[in-house]
Amino acid sequence: MATNFKQYLGDSVYADYDGYYIKLYLDNGIGKHNIIYLEPMVIDALVLYKERIDNERREHNSNNLQPS
């Protein structure tokens, strides 16, 4: 049973999954360009990076809300 994991992420960026790799690519309607294959270890690193950015953003926002 084939499952379609293709998803539009925004800004002409798509993601797809083949059972091992997450494939990121640009598609402007003419065809796929700049395909990046992310293996599980890289996906995990990307998720940790995103969490770090989210934590930094939350810390920055909470510091800006405190009275001077």
Image (tube, grey):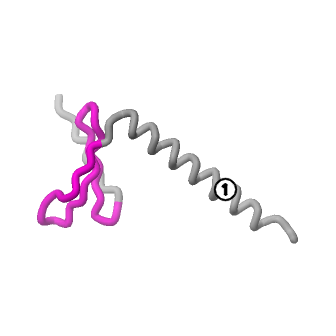
Mark 1, other Cα within 10 Å: few <14 / some 14–19 / many ≥20? few
Residue at 17%, 33% (x, y): give it: 2
- Image height of 24 relative to 19, above or below: below
Residue 20 lies in the magenta stretch: yes
Q: Is residue 27 magenta?
A: yes
Q: As shown in the figure, which amino acid type bears the numbered disc 1?
A: Arg
Q: Quadrant of the C terminus?
A: bottom right
For the stretch drawn in magenta, the main secondary structure is strand
Please report the residue visible at 17 percent of the width from the left and 28 percent of the height from the top. Answer: 1
Residue 55, x across and y down, in percent = 63, 51
In the image, residue 61 above or below residue 21: below
Q: Position of residue 18 (x, y in %)?
A: 23, 36
Residue sitting at the far top: 1
Asked where in the image residue 41 lies, by quadrant, the reply is top left
The residue to which callout 1 is attached is: 58
Q: Tag 1's secondary structure?
A: helix
x and y, in percent, of residue 40 in the image:
36, 33
Q: Is residue 3 above or below residue 24?
A: above
**Percent from the top left, x then y, of residue 19?**
26, 31
- The residue sitting at the bottom extreme is 68
Q: Quadrant of residue 5?
A: top left
Q: Residue furthest left?
A: 30
- In the figure, residue 61 lies in which quadrant? bottom right
Q: Which contiguous range is marked in magenta?
A: 10-37
Is 41 positioned to the left or the right of 27 in the image? right
